[in-house]
Image (tube, rainbow, N blue to C red):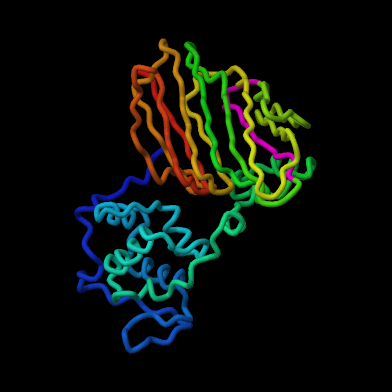
């Protein structure tokens, strides 16, 4: 699948230096001030959106240009800023805003002056403000998953804050994925949380459904399988109901049904995870010649990021994703 490759950021000129481009228009609902800045009524998200549209630059080119100037902001984060799903608050994000003003040809503080006060801080305020995507956003077109969630009376997505997820995926000598080991650290944002639902899908060529086994620090509750889709949805019962702020760790394994050679493993995220680690372990007889990480926006079919990964003497590759945002992340590989 073709990726949206970033353009050479070194060749990207500032929009303000292109004399053939007009100044970005002010939002229709605003009144221009004497300083040339967009008035407060338009809001940061609307002003940023209009400036990006006027510039003609893609989010990936903007990301690359910011990276050249020492500030790393993901395409997902830029997309959330322009749509008002989140706002820049950290010091590095505020520096990115000032660079955006320069990059998009806006007056100094034209965007930063529109930022409202920081959002409430603290563990529970942060959890309450976390974005939670709906099932259709995470699994577009997968009506069976939505039906199973309704049947099992799925708990609200925001009940558990995901602090850490660690996936270890194993590929055997026949080049087939055969086992997944998963570990999650979670914390309750409300009282009385006692369960969660997990979703696993097999490769298209596989026959059968993934099987959840070896649950630790909890037990397996109801399970729904759809063999024609290679789909398993499981209910994990925690060791005890969690009170507000309580944390727990649970682990389990997934036996992968047999099929053809496996070429990738990925996970979809409906909400932010503080740390995600994905390791793929290859049998020494089946070490690939090429291995790469890929990222996608929620529900997208095209990669917005690719990064080559090193397969070392341990015959494994890994991805570390701190502050993983909603979307899709995985590792794919090729054999000679």
Asked whether residue 269 is in view, the answer is yes
* Left or right relative to 209: residue 121: left
Residue 313 lies, with reference to residue 104, above or below; the image says above
At x 23%, y 65%, the residue is 14
At x 58%, y 43%, the residue is 162
Is 197 in the magenta?
yes
Residue 191 lies, with reference to residue 180, above or below; the image says below
x and y, in percent, of residue 271 in the image: 57, 48
Residue 335 placement: quadrant = top left
At x 19%, y 55%, the residue is 11
Asked whether residue 235 is in view, the answer is no
At x 63%, y 44%, the residue is 187
Is 243 in the magenta?
no
Range covered by the magenta-colored residues: 193-207
Location of the N terminus by quadrant is top left
Of residues 256 and 244, the one nearer the viewer is 244
Of residues 48 and 40, the one nearer the viewer is 40
x and y, in percent, of residue 128 in the image: 62, 57
Residue 24 placement: quadrant = bottom left
Of residues 309 and 127, the one nearer the viewer is 127
Location of the C terminus by quadrant is top left
State how many labels appear.
Answer: 0
x and y, in percent, of residue 225 in the image: 73, 29
Which is the main secondary structure of the residues drawn in magenta?
Answer: strand
x and y, in percent, of residue 215 in the image: 68, 25
Return the residue found at the far bottom.
34
């Amino acid at each position: 699948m073709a990726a949206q490759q970033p353009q050479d950021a070194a060749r990207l000129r500032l929009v303000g230096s292109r004399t053939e481009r007009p100044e970005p228009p002010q939002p229709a609902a605003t009144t221009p001030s004497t300083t040339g800045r967009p008035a407060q009524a338009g809001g940061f998200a609307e002003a940023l959106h209009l400036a990006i549209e006027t510039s003609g630059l893609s989010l990936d080119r903007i990301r690359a240009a910011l990276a050249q100037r020492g500030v790393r902001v993901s395409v997902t984060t830029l997309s959330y800023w322009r749509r008002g799903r989140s706002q820049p608050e950290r010091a590095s994000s505020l520096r990115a805003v000032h660079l955006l003003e320069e990059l998009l040809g806006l007056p100094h503080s034209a965007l930063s002056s529109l930022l409202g006060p920081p959002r409430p801080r603290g563990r529970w305020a942060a959890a309450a403000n976390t974005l939670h995507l709906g099932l259709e956003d995470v699994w577009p077109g997968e009506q069976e998953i939505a039906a199973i969630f309704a049947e099992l009376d799925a708990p609200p997505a925001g009940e558990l804050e995901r602090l850490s997820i660690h996936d270890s995926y194993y590929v055997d000598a026949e080049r087939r994925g055969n086992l997944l080991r998963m570990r999650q650290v979670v914390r309750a944002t409300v009282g009385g949380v006692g369960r969660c639902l997990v979703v696993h899908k097999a490769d298209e060529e596989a026959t059968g459904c993934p099987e959840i086994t070896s649950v630790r620090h909890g037990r397996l509750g109801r399970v729904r399988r759809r063999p024609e889709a290679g789909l398993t949805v499981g209910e994990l019962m925690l060791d005890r109901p969690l009170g507000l702020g309580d944390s727990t760790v649970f682990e389990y394994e997934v036996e992968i049904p047999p099929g053809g050679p496996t070429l990738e493993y990925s996970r979809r995220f409906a909400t932010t995870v503080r740390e995600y680690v994905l390791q793929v372990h290859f049998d020494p007889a089946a070490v690939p010649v090429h291995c790469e990480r890929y990222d996608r926006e929620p529900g997208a079919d095209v990669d917005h990021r690719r990064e080559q990964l090193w397969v070392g003497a341990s015959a494994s590759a890994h991805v570390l994703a701190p502050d993983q945002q909603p979307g899709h992340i995985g590792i794919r590989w090729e054999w000679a």
